[in-house]
Image: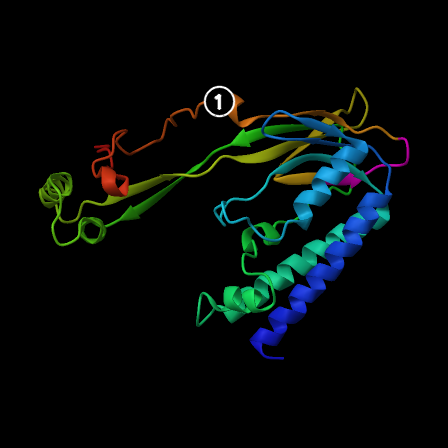
Amino acid sequence: MNDEQQLQYRFAQFRDRLNRFLIQLAREDRPAWIFTPEKREFRDRAAREQLIAVLERLEYPDDRDGRETDPCPGIVGASATTLELAASLNQARDAFKRAVLNLNRRDPQAARRLMAQMGYPRLHFKQLYRHVPILLRKPDSIRFTWGATRSIKRISRQEAYQRLVKLAGDDPSPGYQKQLEALARLDRNEPIAIVQDLKPHIKANVCWILGGDEERKVERRMISAALAILLPLDPGEALPKHSAAYPDERKRRKTRADVKIEREPFLPSIRGHRYLRTG
């Protein structure tokens, strides 16, 4: 198969495994809990319906940015069959993503054009790639939290100049001119830190308590939880202890003790900061 045929095959495979998983998910009656950033909560069948609705959403609407994904955090109890189908679905997602990357090697828009020809002009690639989180052991507790990180990229003074010139155009405004002049006064070897605040994302702090009182051990894992976490439950068995988290309750980011860049941007138009002198 060529790259286009491979993409078509992998997408059909993904659709088949998604349908099998959703049918099985709808059939089960084990406990489930979903919460939304707007502070709504859903239980059991209603929770499963929320998750199914998000997983069925393969395209983004006209009024949405194709980079934004729909969160659906929570916990869903599952049988062994459901967990196996979820794992198979995640594998199909990865295979489709590899097919997209292969097709896009020469032309970054090739996969999007092909999917449009197949009837999916607004296919939400980023949302389609997301795994359904799976735990193979029931934990004692799951606590959700919103996290935010930032990216710091070190570039040369010349790279910073090129970025500014590209934004400023042929007739730079006084603001751009001021930044270019300030940059010109720096030593040619001084680097610039480009800082980008990344969008908050939801994570889950998963905890297992092992052993008795004398040999008690605690095992923890932090996992991405944009979609509800599937975990093994027997019929009638309760969900582990859990707590929701909401974006407006997120703690302010503390300034790290080892931060080595100036707080205020030196080049605001490109989010460029100077590094602090340590000597």
Residue 57: where, in percent of width, then height? 64, 49
Q: Is residue 202 left or right of residue 169?
A: right
Residue 138: where, in percent of width, then height? 79, 35
Task: Name the one closer to the observer, 254 or 57.
Answer: 57
- Is 53 placed above or below 118 here? above
Residue 256: where, in percent of width, then height? 39, 28
Q: Residue at x 75, y 39 (%)?
A: 49
Q: Is residue 84 left or right of residue 249?
A: right
Q: Is residue 104 visible?
A: yes
Q: Is residue 134 visible?
A: no
**In the rendered structure, does residue 37 fall within the stretch colored magenta?**
no
Q: Is residue 12 left or right of residue 44?
A: left
Task: Name the one closer to the observer, 263 or 256.
Answer: 263
Q: Inspect the image, locate mark 1, and give the three-letter code of the amino acid beneath it.
A: Lys
Task: Name the one closer to the observer, 275 or 66.
Answer: 66
Q: Is residue 8 left or right of residue 178?
A: right
Q: The magenta stretch spans which residues?
A: 229-236
- Is 211 placed above or below 266 here? above
- The image quadrant that residue 268 belongs to is top left
Q: Residue at x 62, y 73 (%)?
A: 6
The residue carrying mark 1 is 251
Residue 148: where, in percent of width, then height? 47, 33
Q: Quadrant of the C terminus?
A: top left
